[in-house]
Image: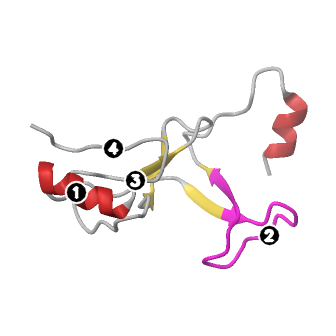
Amino acid sequence: MCRHAYPRHHRFPEEAQKEFEKIVGKRKLLENLGMTETSPLIASNPVKGRKKLGSVGLPLINTDIRLLDPVSGEEVPLGVPGEICVKGPQVMVGLLWQTGRNAASHR
């Protein structure tokens, strides 16, 4: 019995989600977002409650997510592409032996 499925790596197309849910049942596919630098997730659709197809859901507890302009470092308006910046307990401190790169990437 499939309780929930968590697709990884790429966005799961909305039509494919609908087809999948016809087979295993509604609300069993939960899209989420994680990165190598986070352990393992930063956002997820809820198991219970409202879910939005094509969305990675809400930030996990104690997690702040902002989209910043990669050049200016300023927050971008809603709907404008930007660099994902995450603050939370699951974000790794830095890359081993890469102090210069670590300092540049942690704002």
- Depth check: 13 or 3 in front? 13
Please report whichever mark, 1 or 4, sits nearer to the chain's N-terminal start.
Answer: 4
Please report whichever mark, 3 or 2, sits nearer to the chain's N-terminal start.
Answer: 3
Residue farthest to the right, as pictured: 100
For residue 6, which numbered disc appears in the image?
4
Residue picked out by circle 1: 19
Type of residue at label 4?
Answer: Tyr
Residue picked out by circle 3: 12
Look at the image and give the residue range highlighted in magenta: 67-86
**Which numbered disc, 4 or 3, marks the residue closer to the eye?**
3
Inspect this view and state whether residue 46 appears.
no
Asked if 34 appears above or below 82 in the picture, the reply is: above
Q: CA distance from mark 4 to mark 3?
A: 10 Å
Q: CA distance from mark 3 to mark 2?
A: 30 Å
Q: CA distance from mark 1 to mark 3?
A: 11 Å
**Which numbered disc, 2 or 4, marks the residue closer to the eye?**
4
Please report whichever mark, 2 or 4, sits nearer to the chain's N-terminal start.
Answer: 4
The answer to whether the residue labelled 4 contacts the one labelled 3, judged by CB atoms less than 8 Å apart, is no
In the image, 69: left or right of 49?
right
Please report whichever mark, 1 or 2, sits nearer to the chain's N-terminal start.
Answer: 1
Q: Magenta: predominant secondary structure element?
A: loop
Residue farthest to the top, as pictured: 97
- Depth check: 81 or 49 in front? 81
Residue 90: image x %, image y %? Answer: 55, 39
Helix, strand or loop at label 4? It is loop
Q: CA distance from mark 1 to mark 2?
A: 40 Å
**Which numbered disc, 1 or 3, marks the residue closer to the eye?**
1
Q: CA distance from mark 2 to mark 4?
A: 32 Å
Residue picked out by circle 2: 74
The answer to whether the residue labelled 3 contacts the one labelled 2, judged by CB atoms less than 8 Å apart, is no
Q: Residue at x 40, y 53 (%)?
A: 12
